[in-house]
Amino acid sequence: MSEVFDLATDLIRRRSVTPEDAGCLASIGERLGRVGFRIEHLRYGDVENLWATHGANNAPGQGPLLIFLGHTDVVPSGPEEAWQSPPFEPTVRNGRLYGRGAADMKGSVAAMVVALERFVSMHPDHPGRVGLLLTSDEEGPTNLDGVRRVADYFRSIGERIHWCVVGEPSAKEKLGDLIRVGRRGSLSATLTVRGVQGHVAYPEKALNPIHAFAPALAALAAERWDEGNADFPPTSFQVSNLNAGTGANNVIPGSLTALINFRYSTASTADDLRRRAEAILARHGLDYAIEWNLSGESFLTPPGGHLREVVVSVCRDLCGTEPEQSTGGGTSDGRFIAPLGAEVVELGPVNATIHKVDECVDVAELERLPDLYRAICERMLVM
């Protein structure tokens, strides 16, 4: 097939279910080291991170820096018997490469590696610096020791990232038809409402936290948190879990636990959402405790941003598409790089099968993806 196909299949064969890396990063680091990249393996806890850079003045903070960002960990396959072919045995059928991680995102990782190899071979004395940041902790529940932790390391050494291309699968129907130029923030909380347990026949001797919380929940759900803006829809509030009770139908519960989440635009901040939510809870006189978790702030690479314009032009010229420029979807590790001052754009293959049984990527599009990434390098640093 091709270099990118061979590397993608090698990575898919490695059972790197998060946060396991299964040797992916060691193999990639050795490969890039052979073509002159400076390699750092950054291990935090059980998580492997690879930081590879190349350039004439290859030191932290020196010169403009364009990086590619990805992950080698994958979600579990689910029942392997549900797959048409084994999830960790890459298989081609009808022009598609099947296997866990084919689209999310070992195909993109392979394309980034091949693109960088080709770029430094063609432009060994290129201006600025190029880099590749990979982690084995993107699909996990906390992301504490992956890119979030590496970003803290970058701050400590004075590393400055100017532009970041994330290889998350972004396309809808064909390569280049959609890029992501920003993402909403995600703010979650565990809310505990305290009541007084008692017998349902004697409600005057108890305090039902479900009843107490109901008006506050209605107010939270009805609140208009913001109006959004030209780039983002309005902020949304959702309850993902509500739990109370002992299992007996004659007992008023003593407490209630609710899991809540805000997906918010650049029209709001996490601090403002916390303050307003707690004001609503206080206004309803609840006895409560709340534990907040900020997964990531919202970010946007605005119209006119150099990287955004270059990625659009590459999609137009190499794919023949006028890409939709979206801020939809969930979150990505770009949320940890954007606060470093970087413009962030996401460009990758079709996302229709990610996290599903029989995940796959179109082989022809996989083999074109390194050309897109290399062209971004050239237009950002050379042309």
Image (cartoon, grey):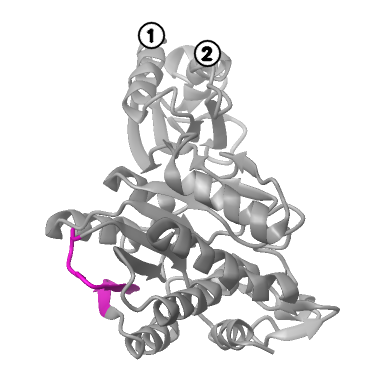
Most extreme residue toward the top is: 283
| Image coords of residue 40 (percent x, y) | 25, 77
Three-letter amino acid code at the position of disc 1: Arg
Q: Relative to 99, is 152 on the left or the right? A: left
Q: Can residue 108 be seen in this view?
A: yes
As helix, strand or loop, the secondary structure at mark 1 comes to helix
5 left or right of 228 in image: right
Q: Residue 47 carries which label?
A: none
Instruction: Name, please, the residue furthest toward the right.
Output: 94
Q: Residue at x 35, y 14 (%)?
A: 279
Upstream in the sequence, badge 1 or badge 2?
A: 2
Counting from the top left corner in percent of width and height, residue 253 is at 49, 30
Q: Can you identify the residue that label 2 sits on?
A: 219
In the depicted structure, whether residue 87 falls above or below residue 209: below
Disc 1: CA contacts within 10 A as few (<14), some (14-19) or many (>=20): few
Q: In which quarter of the image is the C terminus?
A: bottom left
Percent position of residue 290, x then y = 34, 31
**Amino acid tagged 2:** Ala
Q: Is residue 199 above or below residue 342?
A: above
Q: Residue 50: within the magenta?
A: yes
Residue 248's place in the image compared with 358, above or below, is: above
Q: Give the range drawn in magenta.
A: 39-62
Q: What is the C-alpha distance between the residues marked 1 and 2?
A: 10 Å
Q: Which residue lies furthest to the left in this view?
A: 157
User: Looking at the image, which residue sits at the far front?
Assistant: 383
* Whether label 1 touches label 2, CB < 8 Å: yes
Find disc 1 in the rendering and name its residue. 283
